[in-house]
Amino acid sequence: MPPNNIAVRTRFAPSPTGYLHVGGARTALFSWAFARHFGGTFVLRIEDTDLERSTPEAVQAILDGMSWLGLQHDEGPFYQMKRMDRYREVLAKMLADGTAYHCYSSQEEVEAMRERQRAAGEKPRYDGTWRPDANKVLPAVPADRQPVIRFKNPLEGDVSWLDVVKGEIAINNRELDDLVIARPDGTPTYNFCVAVDDWDMQITHVIRGDDHVNNTPRQINILNALGASLPHYGHVPMILGTDGQKLSKRRDAVSVMDYLDKGYLPEALLNYLARLGWSHGDDEIFSMEQMCSWFDLTHLSSSPAQFNPEKLAWINNHYIKAADNQMLSNLVRPQLQALGAQFENAPDLAAVIALMKERVNTTIELAQAAMLFYRQPDASAELRLQHITAAVTPALLDYAEACKTIEWSKAALSQMLKEVLAKHALKMPQLAMPLRLLLTGQLQTPSIDAVVELFGRDVVMQRLAKVSA
C-alpha cells in the first residue's frame, strides 16, 4: 500500500535484447495494474545501454508485445541512450561530491586481485587501490590509461528495505563492492542508470523479478548518495516451466508474441499471468478492470509460480466462447487462408465461428475446425463404402428431395430429418454419419442440422447429388 498523499508512479524497464518474455509481461502487468489501482502513472523505459545486444528489432518486439496485451503506458518510452548527457551530469556531481572516484586499475590488475582473494578464501572484490579515503596517498596516475568511475560504497552498516513481496531484507555493505558506474569510454553502467532514471522519473514503486534482488542494495546506496527518495521495492519470484525449471526458450513458449501466433487472446494471457504469483480469493476468471480494482500489492506470493499450459488453454477457451464472433472472424480469416480455405459460396465466417467456438482452446484450433465449411469434402472410398450403403441410400435420396423445398431453418431441417428417419426405420447415426461424410468429408461435426443450415441449400443439394453417382 502506498503512503498517504503519494502520487503512485511505477515503471516497466526491459532491456531490448530479444522478445518480450512472459515473465517480463507479468512484471509489466503488475506494475501497470498497481498504477491503475491508485490512479497513478505507468512509465515505459527502454534500458538499451547494452549496445552489443540491444537492437531496434528487439525494441519493436517489446512495443508490439505491450500493445498486443493492451498494457498502455502513460509516459515514455524513454531510452537510456538518449539520456547520456544527464548521466554525465550526475557522474560529474558525484565525483565533485566525493561519492564516486576515478579508478585506474586495469582489468588485468582487478582480475589478479580477485584471484588472490579467492586463493585466500575471501569474497572477490575491488580492493580500493584508487579509493580516496582520508590520509591515503594514491598511486601515480598512469599516463596511458583511461579510468573507470567507481561508486564509493559505504564500508559499514547494512542496506535494508521492506520488500513488499519478500519482507525485510538486509545486506551488509561489506558484501558489496565499489561498483563501476562508468566505463573507460565514459558510458554509464546498468545500476547507475537505473538509479538515476528512477530518481528523475520519480518512481515510487519498483516491481520486478527477484533476479534483481542483488541489484537493489547497490541502487539504494547510489540513491542515498544522490540524496534521492527511495522507491518501494517488490521482487516477484520467477516463473517456472512444467518441469519445475526456469522457463527456457528451448522447452517452453516464452515470448509473448508466440502466444499470438499460437492462437491465444491477449485478455486470456493477461488473466493467466495475473494468477501466476498473485490471487484474489478463489477468483480464476476476471477482467483487467477487476484486477486493477483489486491489485494493491497484497496477496503476492513469495514462492515461484509454475506455468501450466493446460490451465492457460482452459482460460483461453473461456475467452473465445465469450468473444464477439465478428472479432474472432477477423482473427481466424488469415489463419483459414493459410490453410487453403475457399470462401466462394461458403457460409458466413462469423456464423461458422458461433457454431464451432465452444469446442476449441485457441483460434488456430478454431480455424482448423472451421475448415470443414471452406474446403471440398474428400472422404476416402473406404469410408464411403462403410457409411453410404444400399440400406441408407433411399433415405439419403428422400432427404435430398425434401431439401429442395423445405424452409431453410435449423428447426425445419431437424423435423424433416426425424421424419425421414421414421419413414425408413433408421436411427440418427445411420443417416447423420453419411450426411456428414457427403457434406464435409468427415464423420465428426457439430449438430448435423446446424451444419446443413450453414452450408445453405445450393451447396447441400450439390453435394447430396453424389449419392446416386
Image (tube, helix red, strand yellow):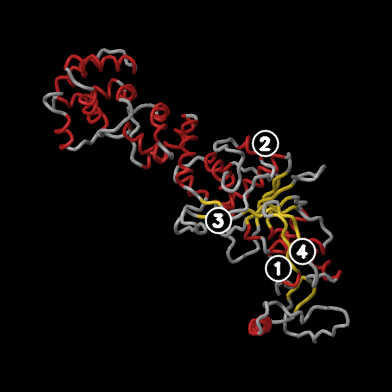
Tag 4, which secondary structure? strand
**The label number, if any, that marks residue 187 in the structure image:** 1
Amino acid type shown at disc 1: Thr
- The numbered mark, 1 or 4, whose residue comes first in the sequence reads 4
- The numbered mark, 2 or 1, whose residue comes first in the sequence reads 1
Q: Is residue 166 visible?
A: yes
**The label number, if any, that marks residue 57 in the structure image:** 3
Amino acid type shown at disc 4: Val
Most foreground residue, 340 or 117? 117
**Closer to us: mark 3 or mark 2?**
2
Q: Which residue is mark 4?
A: 159
Alpha carbon distance from label 3 to label 2: 35 Å
Residue under the point 73% across and 75% down: 148
Residue 129 vertical placement versus 454 (above, below): below
Q: Position of residue 149 (x, y in %)?
A: 75, 73
Q: Position of residue 342 (x, y in %)?
A: 33, 34
Alpha carbon distance from label 3 to label 4: 38 Å
Residue under the point 84% across and 66% down: 93
**Closer to us: mark 3 or mark 4?**
4
Q: Which residue is mark 2?
A: 293
Residue under the point 27% across and 31% down: 440
Residue 84 vertical placement versus 11 (above, below): below
Q: Quadrant of the N terminus?
A: top right
Packing grade of label 2 (10 A; few <14, some 14-19, many >=20) is: some
Alpha carbon distance from label 1 to label 3: 22 Å
**The label number, if any, that marks residue 207 in the structure image:** none
**Closer to us: mark 1 or mark 4?**
4
Packing grade of label 3 (10 A; few <14, some 14-19, many >=20) is: few
**Closer to us: mark 2 or mark 1?**
2
